Amino acid sequence: MKQLMKGSAALGEGAIQAGGGAYFGYPITPQNELTEYMSRRMLEERRVFIQAESELAAINMVFGASVAGARAMTSSSSPGVSLKQEGISYMAGCELPGLIVNVQRGGPGLGNISGSQADYFQAVRGGGHGDYQVIVLTPASVQEMYEMPSMAFSLSEKYRTPALILTDGILAQMQEPMELVKINAARSGDQSWILDGCKGRAPRKIRSLLMEEGALEAHNRHLQKKYIEIKNKEQRYQLINEQAEIMLVAYGVSARVCYTAVQEANRKGLKVGLLRPITVWPFPEKIIQELVPQVKAFLVIELSAGQMVEDVNLAVNGKTPVYFYGRAGGACVTPEEVIKEIGKI
Amino acid sequence: MKKLFGKPESLTTVNHKYCPGCGHGIVHRLIAEVIDELGVREKTIGIAPVGCAVFAYDYWNFDVTEASHGRPPAVATGIKRVLPDRVVFTYQGDGDLAAIGMAETIHAANRGENITVIFINNAIYGMTTGQMAPTSLLGMKTTTTPFGREAKIAGYPIKVSELLVTLEGTTYLARGAVDSAKHVLEAKKAIKKAFEIQLSGKGYSLVEILSQCPPNWKMSVPESLEYVRKEMMTQFPLGVIKDKTGMTV
Ligand SMILES: Cc1ncc(C[n+]2csc(CCOP(=O)(O)OP(=O)(O)O)c2C)c(N)n1
Ligand code: SF4
Ligand SMILES: [Mg+2]
């Protein structure tokens, strides 16, 4: 049965249905509705909710809850996610699962509170210090906001690395019909690293400090091997009109704008399609490489000054022209603007 | 034959990397003895800091995690809220607890988290080789206060335990030292009481230990012990600073 739900509430409920055991947050617009939703629902479900003293504290509470074996998460918006980067790097180094949600807003600095996609680099290039990656998922509807936490938790547990849901203020505040489908809450992956007291087993240690000769290099080799496996196995995307000559590439809210633009362009007889990355790390480069021979041009649409376009360029590798159109500072692209850009190709 | 002295089960056989005379090793042992005596080794989760005690996870024979610099109280909060029946403690230096991690310290205390904090006050940043700590004494020469700590430039030494007294969430706050056999025994009693408070669900406990750091104080071991007694104890008096339980040590 379909019902109307707000993006932020759908994401929160999705995390709860996925067995999220602990939520830690700190207020920041435009993600307050998520923290508020969790403050009520997590207590109703007798799970852990804490309004932390800062985003730093929140991500380190996630670290602790994850160490103790819970499906743990935090959410914030851009400036707050910047503060979490050290903690995310530690989680990657210690190979801890966990979920971070970034409801992006305009930047840099305090910026504004409009939806934006300007934290793409931060999300997919590591963000914090050291050679690491987090798995980055991008919902484009309220339905996906609801279903993605489950996917994020399982991928993050399977590969023992943090997962990030990269969304924005528009999707989080949008209401849309959706269905509360059954969510998979089964924990995945090996759990023999959890700290719950050493009864009946040898004590366990969780650490990212590796000072012995060669130990840190070996650990990095292990991490990189894991990241390559994720790259090979977990690229996800949606493709509309695979025969298109002009392929739009957009994720999240800008993909929504592109849906409308594609329909309009098709009505005019233009062979336009859309590739919507669902994972932006790993970036769906394989499908882009497959599309290269048939596509005359890629047009990347983002609510940023041009970040994901770099990944498209890397995948295309100069074999097909890549165009970019975006608006930064919390401004939104319209379908008319996209059509106009298509016309320029 | 009765064994009078030996290695507590809660300590591993890994050799400590601490300098001769350092207080850290003594406090590690006191914690291990207390955990053995309370019979909670198999349900204890420790949190090692970033500081000289960063290798504590190699020295304790129970579950231990690291935490980023200053965040052990937040990590402990996450663990304890998920596993409320386990014994969770943090072990932190003065830089970790009272500078970079002061917000986490105060808010974990204010929430009355049912955890134990062991706070090693050596008035210096040991690991990074001798910079000023928030607890460095006025006039103290460090690598970042080469002319001695001057209040006008660097503020005053923070009395952490006294600072936490006003927070209703704190149950037990005590200060000890490890400069003499007598003080070591008293410190152990305070640590034991702090863990007992946690075990009985009575809330937040913190034991501050004045600890010597001879190399970074540029002193011999005997000189450093004298410094603890004469200078540190004047600024940071020993004793129970707050006890809401009415339990006797
Ligand atoms: C974010 C961050 N900032 C700075 C450091 C460097 N650092 C490591 S230990 C330390 C201070 C240690 O002093 P204290 O907490 O008093 O512990 P001690 O070594 O004296 O026991 C600092 C500043 C770090 N590791 N991480
Ligand atoms: S530097 Fe100081 S605190 Fe660190 S191990 Fe040496 S004596 Fe101990
Ligand atoms: Mg210190």
Image (cartoon, coloured by chain):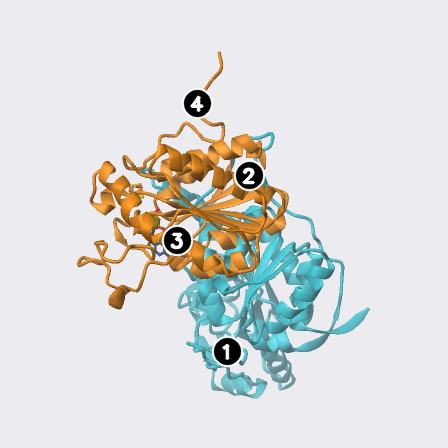
Chain colours: A cyan, B orange
Residue B96 has which mark?
3
- Where does label 4 land, which residue? B6
Indicate if the residue with disc 2 has its beta carbon within 8 Å of ligand 1.
no
Q: Mark 1 is on which residue type?
A: Leu
For the residues labelled 3 and 2, the Cα–Cα distance comes to 22 Å
- Where does label 2 land, which residue? B44
Asked if marks 1 and 4 touch (Cβ < 8 Å), the reply is no
Locate residue A150, reporting x and y percent: 65, 57
Indicate if the residue with disc 1 has its beta carbon within 8 Å of ligand 1.
no
- Where does label 1 land, which residue? A303
For the residues labelled 1 and 4, the Cα–Cα distance comes to 65 Å
Asked if marks 3 and 2 touch (Cβ < 8 Å), the reply is no
Foreground: disc 1 or disc 4: 4
Chain ID, mark 1: A
Foreground: disc 3 or disc 1: 3
The image shows residue A64, relative to residue A4, as above or below, that is above
Q: Earlier in the sequence, mark 3 or mark 2?
A: 2
Given residues A174 and A265, the one toward you in this image is A174
Instruction: Quarter of the image for the N terminus of chain A: give it.
Output: bottom right
The crowd level at tag 1 (other Cα within 10 Å; few <14, some 14-19, many 20+) is many
Whether marks 2 and 1 lie on the same chain: no
Chain ID, mark 3: B
